[in-house]
Amino acid sequence: MLRLPLPAHFRYVHEPLPVGEGIIPVLGHEELAKALRERLVHSRGGTFLVTGFQGVGKSTLVNRALAETAAAWEAQGRVLLVTQLNLARSMTPDQLLFAVVRRIFEELDDRKLLPLLPRDVQHSLPTAYTRTSLSFTQTQSETSERTGSLGLGPQPGPLAVFSPLGVSRTRARSSATEAAFLAYSETDVEHDLVRIIQLLDGSRRRADGAPGVPERRRPLRGRGGGPRGRAAHRMLVHPVVVLDEIDKLTDGRPEAMAEFEELLRRLKGVLTTQGAHFLVVAGPDLHDRAVRWADGCNGVYENVFSWHAYVPCLWDAPERLIDGLLPPLAAPGATPRGTPLDSVKLMRLTRYLRFKAKGIPRRLLQEFNSFVSWEGTAEGPCLRVDQANWARVNLYSRLEEITGAAVARANPVRLARTPIDDDRWRMGGYQVVEWALHSEGRSFAATDVATDVEPAFGLGAPGIDQVLRHLTEASVLEVTRTGDESDTTVYGNAPDAHLTYYKLTDAYRWELARLVDSVVAAPVPDAPAQADETALADEAAPRRDGGEGLGKSPGTESAEVPIDVLATRYALLALINQGGMGAVYRGRDLLTGQPVAVKMMHVGRQRDEEALSWFRREAEISRSMHHPNIVNTIDVLLDPAKSEPALIQELVEGPSLAARLAEEGILLPSRTVLVARQIGQALDYLHDAGLARLDVKPSNVLLHPVRGVVLTDLGRALRVDDDAEADPREPLVGTPSYMAPEQLSGGRVDIRSDLYSLGVLMIHCLTGRMPGEGTPIAELQLQRLHGGSLAVVDDLPVSAELGALITRMTARFPDDRFATPSAFQDALDTTPEGLAEFGLVAREETTTMVFPRLRPDRATAGE
């Protein structure tokens, strides 16, 4: 699909970008590197804090600034002595000081600078190093280094230079022996390190303390790259210590952060010494701490760090990388690298790289390198995106446009917004999109996403919800349940009772499944070029339907793409229904091939032990229920080692009563009576089993074309025998609009509470709205606790007898209602609507009834 040659000097880069090699173009941070270089060149010391997210290029920036500084100093006869320490592991102050001293001496020895220092400096440095080296060795383990000549003579290393300097073996041994008998403490090594810094930087100073001026502007070069001759004795050696990988040490952990801050306090004297620079390279957590302490009067960060630079994400790095390695195809005089079509493809590849990189150069290079190959020694490196990978580039290119727009629109406006605020928001937004793409068709809320989004991004559930809403507008997601639905089941004061739930659209789910399963979409042909260019240009334009093929109905093919497989047996295929507790999916038993319904808890609910107890209760009750008007439970999955909690139930074909009401508006009185009778039969069975509080509402009632009403969702069921007196501490559980007064007040409940809910359901069927719809729970409680039966009953389009029956069902006090479901059914049979619907047919013969659609053009002949 795309094949373009790269420059012959191109090589893979898996480490901080080499300085000056030109393997790839500079991707950014030029101004920050310049600022750091100026700080180093025009100051005699200080500790600088360089922060940023992992992989953003902090080490590359520091290396570039140090290389430029070293070149500038070399032109003036000065030497920049750079030592680097990795602090990914915890270190005590004395261990860190020992390591710094050793690294400085090793660097001097490697660069052959020790013999070139003034005589007095040469005589003073060995003792300090020997004391530190000996103590460090004794701290780690007892070795032979304590005996003999202490590393002199044939042993390599910094101590080997003592003899040529005129320091006798006896004197060196005497200094080491003296050090061995001293109590070499952290204070001592701190003193020696400060002295080393002062000796190096002050080796040639005038009487007033100002740095000496070298006789020659450029030192002569000796073997090994070191200065030689008289000019070398007038040089200044300036140590720069780089403490890298602090973010891996702290990693946002409070205890690690406190340990690092204690390290800063104890080393403050060294870190603020003139004559050396310390560069602390850390993550955004240290940036936040430094900013937080900036307003304090005596904070450790304010006292230690004299300069702080935040290294931002490089969002335009993909463009700079592509432009630097692949010049514009239409540039005057440029060697043609392909047809004009290649520029369109490169644009899409650039968008793909931006989505995958998310502002991090390290990720960018990883993705770019995956498309580079050497097809032959003669041809050299080549950028190649084959047909198998082009569908992936195509999909994520479109997603980048959608994501960029969604993140930009959702970005909150702050009065004092900083670069790190923007980076956090954008990186968090991209992570939300990735999370949604990996949800594979399962329903989720913003709170579910928030548990996996990096806390360092500070996005929060409200910000995540903004991004999800914009993805919904772009047809990447669809809303499965809004947070303001009046029939939402509540569990006490759970804050997520009214959340909005989303899922990946079937179109995107199928497209992603094709990529994962290596089922490549129909390729865009390479010829003719003009046709390809038109197709690609059309596809490159922003689309709200999800792009080519994604806006179309996925059909049966996408519906059979499994979302997940539970316990290696039950495949989830599509979302059926969504509630406040969980969701129901259409599935398939892979062992028997039979369709099933899989009821699962929301991800956020699975971490709630109280919600888990409700789910276990429903599993226990459901397995024991066997009635034609109650959904049958086939299997229960409760072992966390094998699967997420799930109920495997029969798949009842037919809409819910809520869906029928949403489509038709109301039910005819005769059909309302039919629904109420069959619900009453289910309640009668459950009453005999000692159960009550069933959350009777339209969304929990399915309409099977043969069996009639099928009651689902027994998660709120209560064994009345175990509830002689209601526990006042028990939270409010159920759907407030359908609750009986005693249930709203936390009183004792029984089957008469469910008859009240059934009465409310009948009113909803007859009027198209539920009593108390949209009323706050507190106000609803007052109305039902202090009023009589529901006032709306008087306006029902039914006979006086049926109106009186519903009035009795919704009476304020349980004793004024029907005592049992059986008594209710007997009364229902005597109403005109009941007689007209059933005549004198016995109740047992009306168990299975048909539910045709109610619109006149769809009504059956008998309706």
Image (tube, grey):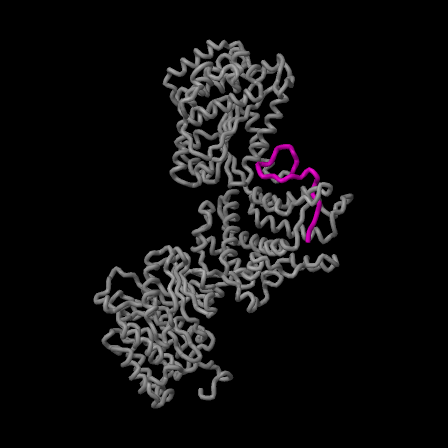
Could you tell me what secondary structure mostly forms the magenta stretch? Answer: loop
The image quadrant that residue 679 belongs to is bottom left
Q: Residue at coordinates 55% horizontally, 35% vertically from top-left?
A: 59
**In the image, 521: left or right of 153?**
right
List x then y, in percent, for residue 784.
29, 70
The image quadrant that residue 233 belongs to is top right
Q: Quadrant of the N terminus?
A: bottom right
Which of 166 and 301 lies nearest the eye of the viewer?
166
Q: Residue at coordinates 30% horizontally, 67% vertically from top-left?
A: 781
**In the image, 787: left or right of 8?**
left
Which of 280 and 297 lies nearest the eye of the viewer?
280
The span shown in magenta is: 1-24
List x then y, in percent, for residue 522.
65, 61
Q: Is residue 113 above or below residue 439?
A: above
Which of 307 and 507 lies nearest the eye of the viewer?
507
Specify whether residue 384 is painted magenta.
no
Q: Is residue 705 above or below residue 338?
A: below
Q: Residue at coordinates 39% horizontally, 19% vertically from top-left?
A: 184
**In the image, 267: left or right of 827?**
right
